[in-house]
Amino acid sequence: MWVISKKRLQEYWTKHPDTKGWLENWYEAACQARWRSLKDVRKMFPHADSVKVASNKSATVFNVCGNRHRMITAVHYNTGKIFVMAIMTHSEYSKNKWKEAL
């Protein structure tokens, strides 16, 4: 898979250093993966979930660092691209404001 973009991950782990190792590992695993469905994603990341957003599209949400943070992505299985849409703390995620922006 092609992850767009690592820069967003780096910006987040600079602000939240506790996420660096997890995000680096996720990036490496995602780049090597050939996911075709959420079922494939869950083989590597069992707690990944598909969530409907305001645009009526689905986002794939990853629990980061034992659920202290969340990463929202758009996984395009047909093109092999993963767009990192947002990363936030669990408390920010729980407010659900991010759903309106996507």
Image (cartoon, grey):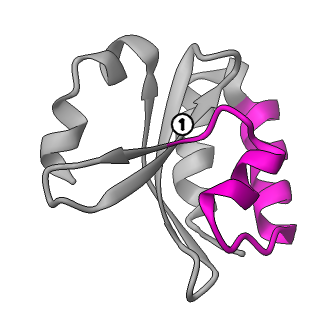
Foreground residue among 90 and 12:
90
Q: Where is the C terminus found, in terms of image quarters? A: bottom left
Q: Residue at x 72, y 70 (%)?
A: 35
Q: Which residue is mark 1?
A: 12
Q: Quadrant of residue 63?
A: top right
Q: Residue at x 35, y 24 (%)?
A: 93
The answer to whether residue 65 is above or below residue 31 is: above
Residue 13 is left or right of residue 74, and the answer is right
Is 13 one of the magenta-colored residues?
no
The answer to whether residue 81 is above or below residue 71 is: below
Residue bounds of the magenta highlight: 20-49
Is 40 one of the magenta-colored residues?
yes
Q: Residue at x 84, y 44 (%)?
A: 25
- Residue 13 percent location from the top left of the image: 62, 33
* Element type where label 1 sits in the image: helix
Numbered disc total: 1
Q: Residue at x 35, y 57 (%)?
A: 58
The answer to whether residue 81 is above or below residue 19 is: below
Q: Main secondary structure of the magenta part?
A: helix
- Residue 75 percent location from the top left of the image: 52, 66
Q: Quadrant of residue 48?
A: top right
> How many residues crowd around disc 1 within 10 Å: few (fewer than 14), some, or many (20 or more)?
some
Q: Kindly identify the amino acid type of the residue bearing the numbered disc 1.
A: Tyr
